[in-house]
Image (cartoon, rainbow, N blue to C red):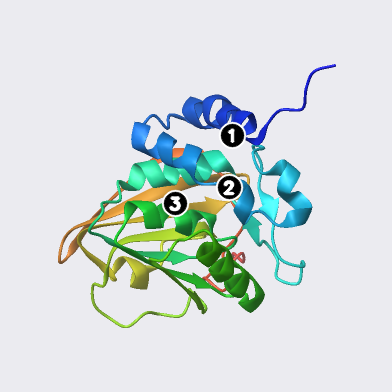
Amino acid sequence: MNPTPTLERLRFNMIEQQIRPWDVLDLEILDLLASIRREDYVPPEHRTLSFFDMELPLGDGSVPGQVMLSPKVEARILQDLHVQKHESVLEIGTGSGFMAALLAHRAAQVLSLEIDPVLAARAAETLRQNGVANVEVRNADGAVPLPSGPSFDVIVLSGSVARIPQNLIGSLKVGGRLAAIVGDEPMMRAHFVTRTSESKWDTIQPWDTVAPRLLNFPEPSRFSF
């Protein structure tokens, strides 16, 4: 009989079999994923699935689409944003707090907004227990427009939207980047928007994936005449 794999073996397999094949090759990102205990952020009832290539449900089901994104998607977003130690980050959709923890180890400070008060409180406590001190989790609707003006170096939408929210790209500092998964099932694309000047933004769409919707962001009309 084969022995049960240890958590460290499962973590190693997650990195080598899921994350590296998804072109996440930045050694600092891979080291970070090896050191931060993903299982600490997974709900107890799903902890045995912590290292699987899948989204994990969060909450009690009363708020639709609340999931932990798959490890490879979280890792690829983190790599492609190139977050720097002096930068400030806004995350929309705290969820479990795991992505906020990853961002916190790359950035100076992170503000993470979570619409579900239960998830917000749970994520804040999990981050505290894991010694992540530079994240503020706020129970708030990320679809509500922010105060005008550039405020953040990096903005991450931890879920999908039908289109890039214009108020959020306006909240980027010059040189700032926004990551979002945009489109409709069955095919969405990761969008990375860089603010190159006060009035110009460049966008690339380097890879495909699918993710549940963030709540309350506008949806295009389905009607045609």
Say what secondary structure mark 2 lies in: helix
**Residue found farthest to the top:** 1
Q: Which of these two is toward me, 10 or 217? A: 10
What residue type is disc 3 on?
A: Leu
Position in image of residue 53 (x %, y %) = 64, 37
Position in image of residue 65 (x %, y %) = 67, 61
| Position of 148 relative to 167 (above/below) | below
Say what secondary structure mark 3 lies in: helix
Residue matched to label 1: 11
Position in image of residue 222 (x %, y %) = 61, 64
- Whether residue 206 sits left or right of residue 34 in the image: it is left
Crowd around label 1: few <14 · some 14–19 · many ≥20 (10 Å): many
Residue matched to label 3: 102
Q: Which of these two is toward me, 130 or 203? A: 130
Residue at 22 percent of width and 58 percent of height: 86
Earlier in the chain: of badge 3 and badge 1, it is 1
Position in image of residue 154 (x %, y %) = 31, 59
Calculate the distance from the C-alpha at mark 1 to the C-alpha at mark 2. 9 Å
**Residue found farthest to the bottom:** 147
Say what secondary structure mark 1 lies in: helix
Q: Which of these two is toward me, 158 or 130? A: 130
| Position of 156 relative to 63 (above/below) | above
- Whether residue 91 sits left or right of residue 198 in the image: it is right
Crowd around label 2: few <14 · some 14–19 · many ≥20 (10 Å): many
**Residue found farthest to the right:** 1
Earlier in the chain: of badge 1 and badge 2, it is 1
Residue matched to label 2: 38
Residue at 51 percent of width and 66 percent of height: 128
- Whether residue 191 sits left or right of residue 58 in the image: it is left
What residue type is disc 2 on?
A: Arg
Residue at 37 percent of width and 41 percent of height: 79
Q: Quadrant of the N terminus?
A: top right
